[in-house]
Image (cartoon, helix red, strand yellow):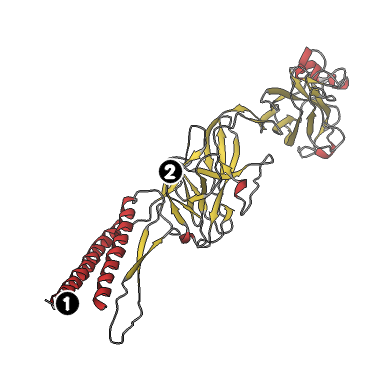
Amino acid sequence: MSINSALLAGVSGLVANSSALAAISDNIANVNTTAYKRNQVAFATMVTSQAVKGEYSAGGVQGNNHSFVSQQGLIQSAASSTDLAISGDGFFVVSQNATSPASQFTRAGAFQPDAAGYLVNDAGLYLQGWPVQANGTFDTDPSDLSKIKPINIKNLGAAVQQTSQIGVSANLNQTTPTSVAAATYSAVTKSMAAYAATGIGTAPDAAPIEVTVIDSVGGAHKFAMAFEKTSTPNTWNAEIYAVPATDVSSAGPSGQVAAGLVKFNTDGTIDLANTTLFGAAGAAPVINLAASAGAAPKWGTALGIAASTFNIDLTQLSQLASASTVNSVSSNGASAGNIVGVQVGTDGVVSALFDNSQVRKIAQLAVATFPNGDGLAATSGNAYRGTLQAGTMTLKAAGAGGAGKISPSSLEASTVDLSAEFTGLITTQKAYSASSKIITTADNMLSELISIIR
């Protein structure tokens, strides 16, 4: 009967508008929730078959919730370096705890280290990423969630960087007169290393250039590079030796690790092709120090440290007619340091900062993308889980393959517009009242119908 259908249509209107009110209430309540995505109840008509010609049966209305998960919120600056936002498509991958598998996705990036050092957001969800490999790369996989792990920024230990590169910028005075000692110089019996250790032998013609070498356990060792001009133009005797000599066991004089000739071109630049300081003419400028049990030269037995190999860049060594001087000495080694901060790049690489100026990669954030982000199912904690409607998940590095870039020290704001929500409150209230009027009117008509039989 048409009156009954009108009555049911009114009820459906009440139900649909109640759902709309609930969605608006959620939106308003979460106006300040980080990366909250607004919900909206969309109304759709319900049509019933018309059984009797000339009569109309009301079908009513149906409310369908729609979450605007893919809508980008405003990116706002934040104070913490671990406050993160995704600028573009994608979601952070998170888990319920440090041991459970990654199964949820969120854009709420207010992450802070917990007591154990794991990055956790305000909802207690653990941020996931690809751990750094021994060679400094990341074993990424577009679909294997088992390869990502919770990111821990505390339990890293101390950072040590063994010296592998030394650079020297200096000048040797071209006008230095050839010394009498140069005629009797011997890298074995009258060496500059021996002079440095005992005060007897052959003194260098220029102040030794001292460099610091960091070993495998973070210990610092001093090495010196000394020069003595020969009677051959543009040619100098040169040695590299440890100070004190006991740091190194050598086949030659105590502490000596290299000895030979350093030659210069007529324009004052170094002639590396004919320099023999590191062995044969043109040999690579590399110092190899074996471990204590290795062949000489090697680290002193008492040190008990691993072997070291470091390159010495002498391309900035010159011979000009000016005072011998050292311009700069650089080394990439660093002794033991403790973590003092964390930085995150736009590519999602999380790195630890140490007080010895070292930067160590920890992990790379995995950004999950879906063909239909709006099809994800919401879970508690402003997170989502995958569904058939959302499509197949793909894990990507930030900024790659359409995935958004990471914005460090930033947070994504809620997408709720209060003015639109308050307007929605008014229209929803009016629609609810109108639906209730349908019910009261249908009730009055039924009452009139019933009164006919009296």
Q: Position of residue 242 (x, y in %)?
A: 75, 21
Q: In this view of the protein, which residue sits in the foreground, 258 or 316? A: 258
Determine which of the numbered discs, if any, sits on residue 317 in the image: none
* Front residue of 410 and 101: 101
- Residue 325, percent from left and from top: 68, 28
Q: Earlier in the sequence, mark 1 or mark 2?
A: 2
Quadrant the C terminus occupies: bottom left
Q: Secondary structure at mark 1?
A: helix
In this rendering, the label closer to the viewer, 1 or 2: 1
Residue 417: in sight, yes or no? no
Mark-to-mark CA distance, 1 and 2: 58 Å
Assign a secondary structure to mark 2.
Answer: loop
Q: Residue at x 46, y 61 (%)?
A: 374
Q: Residue furthest front?
A: 454
Q: Is residue 393 left or right of residue 417?
A: right
Residue 449 — which label?
1
Q: Amino acid at mark 1?
A: Leu
For disc 2, the marked residue is 123
Above or below, comparing residue 203 to residue 5 in the picture: above
